[in-house]
């Protein structure tokens, strides 16, 4: 394959990956690759692009594409209507290659989001806060009442504990970046549901990719599940590092859990000590 063709193909694959389409198949005798959402069940895939660690769901980053996120599931689902025509990869000029995104671009793309039902109950979208080039990113679950009111993550009681922990690692809040898996407050502060997470988490993946931190700290089980695909109990996993594309991820208890179980604060301190040592060692 010549270089120009290879570049065109790469641009197309990247374009489809941004749409959440990662599998293609070759209909027998056609010689034309077809995107997987149009694939007949019996057709064998000819290429499957890695979707990250075992058990990971579509959209989570793989080693080769850290932080690359698929679209909201509503966008990924085939639409109703006449049967879709097979798409040839080469029917149109290739889309422009997407350069490294900034947080502002991700925020702009999120817009006045109405992609899921959480939009109906929110006051403010809580996108995230902090240093756009942070070494350390914290990912919580979703905004609570205080966050919804102020439009900023972790500003309530859990946020105060997180602030103390950030100081404990020798950093200031402005130096790190803080965000959540969902950007709108779930009613009654319930845990976000799967479809809400599926819809919103691509923006989280893109935030992390825009920042390119050295460490992403998952605060609580939902963040751990969303970013790492780990379904085990957090008690067994906390305090450990994982690969997250080209960066590292770490799992710690959510500060709100510690507020409810103050005896566990010792464990949180231990985990933040581990974070401190990690950041020191790699400097
Ligand atoms: N809990 C979270 O998970 N996130 C916030 O922003 C606040 C509380």
Image (cartoon, rainbow, N blue to C red):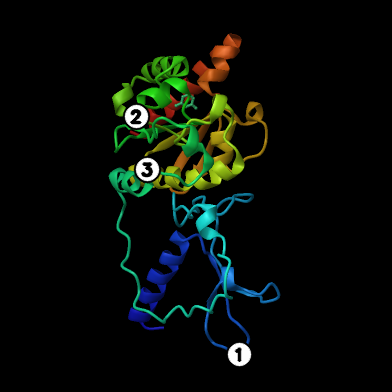
Helix, strand or loop status at disc 2:
loop
Residue situated in front as seen by the camera: 121 or 189: 121
Q: Secondary structure at mark 1?
A: loop
Above/below status of 98 relative to 142: below
Q: Is mark 3 within 8 Å of ligand 1?
A: no
Taking 232 as reference, is 35 left or right?
left
Residue indicated by mark 2: 176
For this orientation, the residue located farthest to the top is 263
Q: Residue at x 51, y 44 (%)?
A: 116
- What is the CA distance from the residue labelled 3 to the residue labelled 1? 46 Å
Image height check: is 215 above or below 35?
A: above
* Nearer to us in this view, 123 or 74: 123
Q: Quadrant of the C terminus?
A: top left
Q: Nearer the viewer, mark 2 or mark 3?
A: 3
Front residue of 235/199: it is: 199
Residue 99 position in % (x across, y down): 30, 58
Which image quadrant for residue 239? top right
The residue carrying mark 3 is: 112
Query: Residue 136, can we see it?
Result: yes
3 or 1: tag closer to the N-terminus: 1
Q: Is residue 27 left or right of residue 90?
A: right
* Cβ–Cβ under 8 Å for marks 3 and 1: no
- Classify 17 as above or below 200: below
* Residue at point 44%, 42% (across, down): 204
**Is residue 181 visible in the rendered structure shown here?**
no
Extreme right residue here? 42
Residue lying at 49% horizontally and 44% vertically, measured from the top left: 201
The x, y position of residue 9, in whole percent, is 41, 75
Circle 2: is it few (<14), some (14-19), or many (20+) Cα within 10 Å? some
Q: Which residue is mark 1?
A: 29
Question: Mark 1 or 2, which is nearer the eye?
Answer: 1
Q: Residue at x 55, y 75 (%)?
A: 84
């Amino acid at each position: 394959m010549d270089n120009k063709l290879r570049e065109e193909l790469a641009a197309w694959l990247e374009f489809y990956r941004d749409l959440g389409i990662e599998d293609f198949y070759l209909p027998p005798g056609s010689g034309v690759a077809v995107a997987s959402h149009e694939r007949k069940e019996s057709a064998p895939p000819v290429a499957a692009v890695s979707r990250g660690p075992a058990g990971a769901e579509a959209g989570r980053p793989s080693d080769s594409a850290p932080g690359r996120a698929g679209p909201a599931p509503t966008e990924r689902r085939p639409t109703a209507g006449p049967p879709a025509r097979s798409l040839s990869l080469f029917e149109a000029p290739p889309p422009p290659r997407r350069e490294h995104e900034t947080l502002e671009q991700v925020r702009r793309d999120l817009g006045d989001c109405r992609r899921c039902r959480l939009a109906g109950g929110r006051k403010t979208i809580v996108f995230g806060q902090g240093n756009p080039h942070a070494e350390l990113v914290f990912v919580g679950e979703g905004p609570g009442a205080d966050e919804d009111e102020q439009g900023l993550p972790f500003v309530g009681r859990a946020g105060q504990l997180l602030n103390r922990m950030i100081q404990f690692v020798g950093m200031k809040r402005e130096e790190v970046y803080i965000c959540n898996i969902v950007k709108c407050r779930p009613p009654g502060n319930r845990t976000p549901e799967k479809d809400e997470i599926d819809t919103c988490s691509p923006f989280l993946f893109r935030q992390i990719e825009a920042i390119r931190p050295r460490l992403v700290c998952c605060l609580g089980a939902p963040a751990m599940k969303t970013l790492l695909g780990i379904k085990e109990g957090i008690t067994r996993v906390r305090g450990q590092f994982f690969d997250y594309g080209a960066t590292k991820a770490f799992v710690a208890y959510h500060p709100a859990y510690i507020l409810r179980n103050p005896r566990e604060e010792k464990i949180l301190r231990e985990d933040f000590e581990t974070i401190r040592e990690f950041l020191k060692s790699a400097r």
